[in-house]
Amino acid sequence: MTLLSAVQMNSQNDIDANFIVIESLIQQSKANGAELIVFPENFVCFAAGKQRETAAQFEDIQKRLEKLAHQYQTWIVAGTLPCPFRPDGSVIKDGRVRTVSLCISPERTEARYDKIHLFDVQVGDAVGGYQESKFFEPGTDVVVAKTPFGDIGLMVCYDLRFPELALTLRAKGANILTAPAAFTYTTGQMHWQLLLQARAMDSQCTVLGAAQQGWHGEKRQTWGHTAATNSRGQVLDLIHTQGAQLITVPFDLAEQAHIRESMPLMQHRKLMQF
């Protein structure tokens, strides 16, 4: 059995201040005996309009996170970071950046996932409308990272609403799905827990939903409620209170294999054309 942690944060626009919280949470995760810690979306810097400024520091931030992973001998799913270049190294020319989730081992960065589904929606909150595609370029590649305790399918926030992605990750060998997120208060209240459980049921993967919580500036409010579900879609733990904290939950590959053998969803699935 392996222990896995998922984090809740209230990140602001001060990168160094956020890193103090990040290191403290890693220390807590290690004290709990966890081998993996998953951070939320925008965990290093949550500041509207500063994506390009933060993206310019992408490689320096990546090195800081790799150093922490090595220092504490832990695996990190580095929520999301804005990045000015694609996985092949080509620079994005139109002023946009990519939303990148890194999977970092104690030795190196093992995988990079660029968020595929962008949040272009109308929401009944103080912001009103969101248009991520104005500031971000979508990724195209589905990514599974191999670890000693199970393979991780990398997702981000809005990706949770698309079961096809979770099913593709499962087909590529994922045992665990990570979902760094910054759900709005409005949409999170309606759908966050439901989506975590639904994707776990679809894929028969453990799902780790690491969430931003609280106010970020004067208008943006996120839902929080960091949670983890098992491969049956049952909630293992859920944060109900405010502030930076984490949950640590068990993961057992043998138990997951039994669940999948008892109800062989992938073998029973019928492919249908839309």
Image (tube, rainbow, N blue to C red):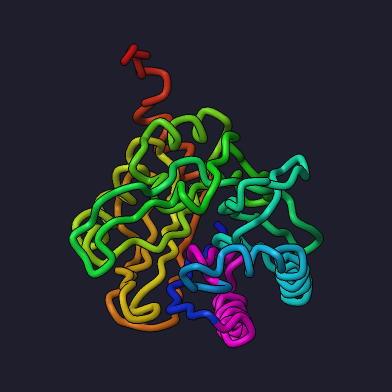
> How many numbered marks appear?
0
The reply, left or right, for residue 243 in relation to residue 149 is left
Please give the name of the residue rendered at 23% of the width and 56% of the height, measured from the top-left corner: 123
The magenta region covers: 14-43
The verdict on residue 79 being magenta is no
Quarter of the picture holding the N terminus: bottom right
Can residue 90 be seen in the rendering of this structure? yes
Camera-side residue of 177 and 160: 160
Q: Is residue 273 above or below residue 83?
A: above
Please give the name of the residue rendered at 36% of the width and 35% of the height, measured from the top-left corner: 163
Q: Position of residue 177 (x, y in %)?
A: 49, 47
Camera-side residue of 160 and 85: 85
Residue 153 placement: quadrant = top right
The reply, left or right, for residue 50 in relation to residue 242 is right
Please give the name of the residue rendered at 30% of the width and 69% of the height, measured from the top-left corner: 223
Camera-side residue of 132 and 261: 132
The verdict on residue 32 being magenta is yes
